[in-house]
Amino acid sequence: MFYKAKHRFADVSPRKMRPFAQLIRGKNVDEAIEALRFYPNRGARLIEAVVKSAIGNAEDQGCRDLEELVVTECRIDGGPMFKRIRPRARGTAFGIKRRLAHIIVTLTDIEAMETAIEAEATRELADEAAAASTPALPPASHTPTPAATTPATETPPAPATPEGIPPAQG
């Protein structure tokens, strides 16, 4: 079963948080929290909080083994940008884009993940067996249609004027 948690509009740039998301993707929940705990980075704190929230959601939804959960998805999406200005010399201004992020964490049971992988493998084997048992149809022979065999009637060219210039159409 999948257990999700989101933190929307996090006040850290997605670019600063994506390395931490890549760090915990595919790890056990305890390993992920331990990996994030000792980074002195605000993005790591936010992702750690979302992972803990996903664990709480799993507990509320009746997950039996919280230690068996794996981080299957940790995605950092870009949120809205606030545009600010920074005053510069001689009355000019530079633009600043204050970027926000959306953090999405999905946890899965190891057992559920293994059964899903096994089910997909058996489904692929069944599809291959079904494809092998059905005979292949011979290629359809192309027979020309009667309209394609008859020559098209050609329109005669327009007669030329005495000077050799064709008449104007219109």
Image: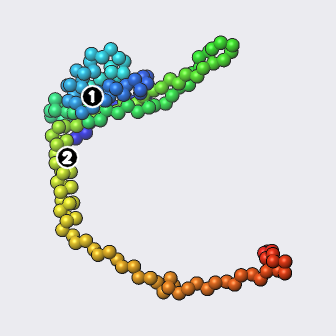
Q: Taking 156 as reference, is 166 left or right?
A: right
Q: Residue at x 36, y 28 (%)?
A: 18
Q: Secondary structure at mark 1?
A: helix
Q: Taking 4 as reference, is 154 left or right?
A: right
- For the N terminus, the image quarter is top left
Q: Which mark is residue 24?
A: 1
The reply to whether residue 57 is visible in this rendering is: no
Q: Secondary structure at mark 2?
A: helix
> Which badge, 2 or 1, is on the more N-terminal residue?
1
In this picture, is 14 found above or below 128? above
Q: Position of residue 39 (x, y in %)?
A: 30, 17
In this picture, is 144 found above or below 127? below
Classify mark 2: residues with Cα within 10 Å, few (<14), some (14-19) or many (20+): few
For mark 2, what is the residue?
A: 116
Give the amino acid type for the residue marked by disc 1 in the picture.
Ile
Q: Position of residue 123 (x, y in %)?
A: 20, 55
Q: Residue at x 19, y 46 (%)?
A: 117
Question: How did the renderer colour the structure?
Answer: rainbow
Give the amino acid type for the residue marked by disc 2 in the picture.
Ala
Q: Residue at x 53, y 87 (%)?
A: 150
Quarter-of-image position of residue 104: top left
- For the C terminus, the image quarter is bottom right
Q: Position of residue 33 (x, y in %)?
A: 24, 23
Q: Which mark is residue 59?
A: none
In three-dimensional space, the C-alpha distance between marks 2 and 1, rounded to whole angstroms, equals: 21 Å
- Give the label, 2 or 1, closer to the camera: 1
The reply to whether residue 46 is visible in this rendering is: yes
Q: Taking 46 as reference, is 148 left or right?
A: right
Q: Residue furthest right?
A: 163
Classify mark 1: residues with Cα within 10 Å, few (<14), some (14-19) or many (20+): many
